[in-house]
Amino acid sequence: MPDIQIDKTSVEQQIRYLQDTLYVISGKWKLPILVAVHEGSSRFRDIQRSVNGITSKVLSKELKELEQNKLVVRKVYDKSPPTVEYTTSNYCDTLQKMVAEMIDWGKNHRDKIREK
Amino acid sequence: MPDIQIDKTSVEQQIRYLQDTLYVISGKWKLPILVAVHEGSSRFRDIQRSVNGITSKVLSKELKELEQNKLVVRKVYDKSPPTVEYTTSNYCDTLQKMVAEMIDWGKNHRDKIREK
DNA sequence: CTGTATCCATGATGATACTG
DNA sequence: CAGTATCATCATGGATACAG
């Protein structure tokens, strides 16, 4: 006899996927960085200038995480002076649909909350 | 002559919407709580039991925020003993499409990362 | 039961400096 | 330029107790 628990497991599994996603894109900097890189900032210094207020330490950490999640690509060109180029991956484009939904919801939500 | 800056403003605006959305649903507990309530836990104590590991302090805080964002509804029935009932709002349903996309992406992402 | 108050550990972030 | 190291600060979360 199949166990009806399957439903519960499935819900919990979905929550896990959800949290994976949140983990990858949430936080103060991830999306702004992705946008900055996507819009053309490719050098560490450029990105730092584009993303207002971020320190090199944090930028370094965030870029590493984004790279691990295959959303940005890091290319090193030579040694002195060090030249590193960051670009968004093709995989990064798979975020588009989801991000579009999030923007939609956020846009609507702002009005909703204003209704008091 | 129209200013081409419009594009940049728009991007920044979109980031703001995105961050609004993230602010509302991100974090360790928000979604699990919403799911628990949606699945039928309506009393404070029930929710705390359903959402594994959350303390009353944190649950209290999260519920307040969810209520402010009109995702849950709080109803008080009497005074002693205090009886409070939480339910998800109709508005909460507007999250569905977005959440579905996030689950999709997270599901796919887990495989993607495993590719090493 | 439904929370609030208090204390504490921990991690994240900022400021600043420094290396290759 | 592209980061890393160090230190101080601060917000958040957990544990526990307790109030209405």
Image (cartoon, coloured by chain):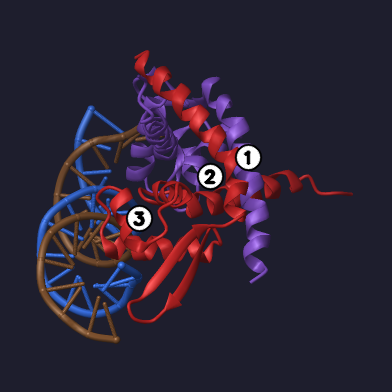
Chain colours: A purple, B red, C blue, D brown
What is the residue that sits farthest to the front in this orientation? A1
Which residue occupies 45% across, 29% down? Answer: B106
Mark 1, residues whose alpha carbon is within 10 Å: few (<14), some, or many (≥20)? many
Residue A107 falls left or right of residue A87: right
- The residues bearing labels 2 and 3 have C-alpha atoms spaced at a distance of 42 Å
- In the rendered structure, find residue A53 and report the number of the disc placed on it: none
Of B51 and D9, the residue lying toward us: B51
Which residue occupies 50% across, 46% down? Answer: A51
Position of residue B13 measured from the top left corner of the image (x, y, whole percent): 65, 51
- The residues bearing labels 3 and 1 have C-alpha atoms spaced at a distance of 28 Å
- In the rendered structure, find residue A50 and report the number of the disc placed on it: 2
> Is B84 placed above or below D14 here?
below
Which residue occupies 73% across, 44% down? Answer: B7
Mark 2, residues whose alpha carbon is within 10 Å: few (<14), some, or many (≥20)? some
Residue type, label 3: Ile
Q: What is the quadrant of the C terminus of chain B in the image?
A: top left
Residue at the disc numbered 3: B47
Position of residue D3 measured from the top left corner of the image (x, y, whole percent): 31, 34
- In the rendered structure, find residue A101 and report the number of the disc placed on it: 1
- Secondary element under disc 2, as helix, strand or loop, is helix
Let me know if marks 3 and 1 both belong to one chain: no
